[in-house]
Amino acid sequence: MTHPFAAVLPAAGRGTRFGSEDKLLMNLCGKPLLWWTISVFGESPRISWVVVPVPPARLHKFKGLVASWEFEKYVQVIPGGAYRHLSVLEGLKVLPEETRWVAIHDADRPLLTPELLESVLDAAERVNAVIPAVPIKDTVKRVDLQERINETLPRGDLRAAQTPQVFELKFLRSALEALDPNEIPTDEASILEKIVATHAVAGSYENLKITTPEDLEYARWILAKRLDRRLEKGLRIGIGYDSHRIAEGRPLYLGGVQIPWDKGLVGHSDGDVLLHAVIDALLGASGGMDMGHHFPDTDPAYAGIRSTELFQRAWKDLKKEGYRLNNLDSVILAQEPKLAPHIQEIRQSLAALLEVSPNLIAVKAKTGEEMDSVGRGEGMAAHVAVTLVAGSY
Ligand code: MG
């Protein structure tokens, strides 16, 4: 397999101007800032390798964190260097030999969009060295040590350089290795542009570098707006319904909780009628296909599987799309056993699965008043309603 594109995300800075060495771990709409940055590269089908150089003293912490974020792509965390370009150089050393282009991106630019990344990668295939940049809005003055203005620079041909900056690996590596040890470049292009033609493509004013605490506030606002835009309307409602037959010698699971009883529910999985209705309600709210489509009961892979496992798979995908639970209401229909003693535990279980407070979860139980199939004790059923919102906090 060839690996044409790799990414190095230098993250070994000290956050001096931000006032905290934990800048990259600051909460940005429910996730650490660094999570957002890595996810753009982790989800790009063209990037096959992601390397994150971090402060050597915090290597263990960052390794653990990044591993816990469970990106589908392998993300390698390595000790960085004393300066940004030294961190980049360390990153280049671990890339697979067949890497042709490498994207260097500031770990503290979490608002890079997949579209901008793609456009820079496209341009790199044509010109080999490319950076995103934006026109400067303010008029730029050069001042002396007394802050006296010496010069007004012509704004028309000035650009503010952003990242990802994408280069042919062999050029970048040799340029970094040949660098005068006293020279401390602020970006990679400033080294490369002296050697190879380096082009600017249109960047984005929203591709912010989080340098000071105000930048983080602005980033939160931009990201929340984006996440809201992902949903056509702010709130999505979903309903789910399921029913299962009762049989002797089966365990009874409701909402992921095993309820002591001498009977249980028949099903291809563990027969958790409530959790199945929850999954269908969530999928419905997102506008997706139902549970049977995702986990067909003709597939032996799901035989005897715990419904909590099915739930986790569906919920992981929904979270990736930016959804979180707003609230859930449910009714379990069962003539027997008495469910009242178990209601709180079922609420807690659903709250834990959905990563919200139990205050947002309602579980009610009704008998069938001995009238219908539920009432005659032939089966159980569950109704669930949910509302989902985008992942902005
Ligand atoms: Mg079912």
Image (cartoon, rainbow, N blue to C red):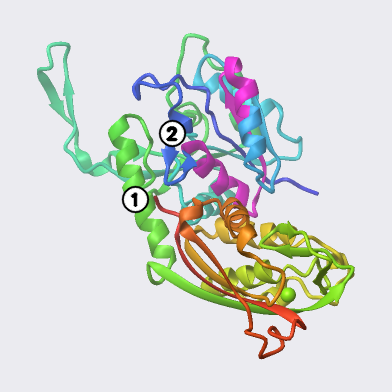
The residue located at (36%, 41%) in the rendering is 208
> Which of the two residues, 232 or 252, is positioned nearer the viewer here?
252
Q: x, y percentage for residue 30?
A: 46, 45
Dot placed on the residue nearer the N-terminal end, 2 or 1: 2
Q: x, y percentage for residue 205?
A: 32, 47
Name the residue beneath numbered marker 2: 26
**Left or right of 308, for residue 356:** left
Q: Which residues are magenta?
A: 33-62
Helix, strand or loop for the magenta stretch, by majority: helix
**Image position of 65 with respect to 42: above or below:** above
Query: Tag on residue 86?
Result: none
Q: Amino acid under label 2? A: Met
Name the residue beneath numbered marker 1: 222
**Left or right of 192, for residue 132:** left
Q: Quadrant of residue 101?
A: top right
Q: Secondary structure at mark 2?
A: loop
Q: x, y percentage for residue 275?
A: 66, 66
Residue 55 drawn in magenta:
yes
Residue 308 visible? The answer is yes
Q: Quadrant of residue 152?
A: top left
> Going by the picture, which residue comes out furthest to the top?
182
> Which of the two residues, 41 or 376, is positioned nearer the viewer here?
376
**Left or right of 55, for residue 391:** left
